[in-house]
Amino acid sequence: MGTRLVINGVNSTPSTINLVISTSHFENQIKVTLPANSTISLQMFICIVGIAILVGGGAGPA
């Protein structure tokens, strides 16, 4: 699974992580300037065949 931020309905290329190997941990740091009332979501997407197991109680994006 890969992840990316979607800012105001547009995929953020600098935030995109495309995994090519199986891993249980990854991170990415970016800085963006956002206009007032922006919407941000974290999206998981399939970049190779696989599954994701989400564990409750995690810290999530900060």
Image (cartoon, rainbow, N blue to C red):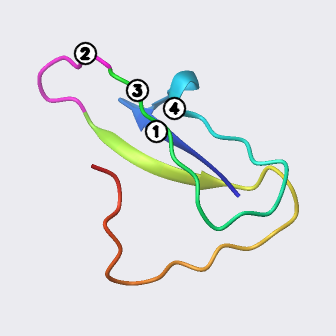
Mark 3 vs mark 2, foreground winner is 3
**Amino acid beneath label 2:** Thr
* Residue at image mark 3: 30
* Residue at image mark 2: 33
* Residue at image mark 4: 15
- Residue 14 placement (x, y as % from top left): 54, 23
Magenta residues span: 32-38
Q: Earlier in the sequence, mark 3 or mark 4?
A: 4
Mark 4 vs mark 1, foreground winner is 4
Separation of marks 2 and 1 at Cα, in angstroms: 14 Å
Indicate whether 51 appears above or below 12.
below
Image marks 4 and 1: residues in contact by CB distance under 8 Å: yes
Q: Earlier in the sequence, mark 2 or mark 4?
A: 4
Image marks 2 and 1: residues in contact by CB distance under 8 Å: no
Q: Earlier in the sequence, mark 2 or mark 1?
A: 1
Q: Earlier in the sequence, mark 4 or mark 1?
A: 1
Q: Quadrant of the N terminus?
A: bottom right
* Residue at image mark 1: 5
Q: Nearer the viewer, residue 12 or 27?
A: 27
Bin the neighbour count of mark 1 within 10 Å (Cα to Cα): few under 14, some 14-19, many 20 and up. many
Indicate whether 6 appears above or below 61.
above
Image marks 3 and 4: residues in contact by CB distance under 8 Å: yes
Q: Secondary structure at mark 4?
A: helix
**Amino acid beneath label 3:** Ile
Residue at position x 38%, y 84% in the image = 56
Indicate whether 5 appears above or below 59.
above
State the image quarter where residue 31 is shown. Answer: top left
Image marks 3 and 1: residues in contact by CB distance under 8 Å: yes
Is 26 placed left or right of 8 in the picture? right
Q: Secondary structure at mark 2?
A: loop
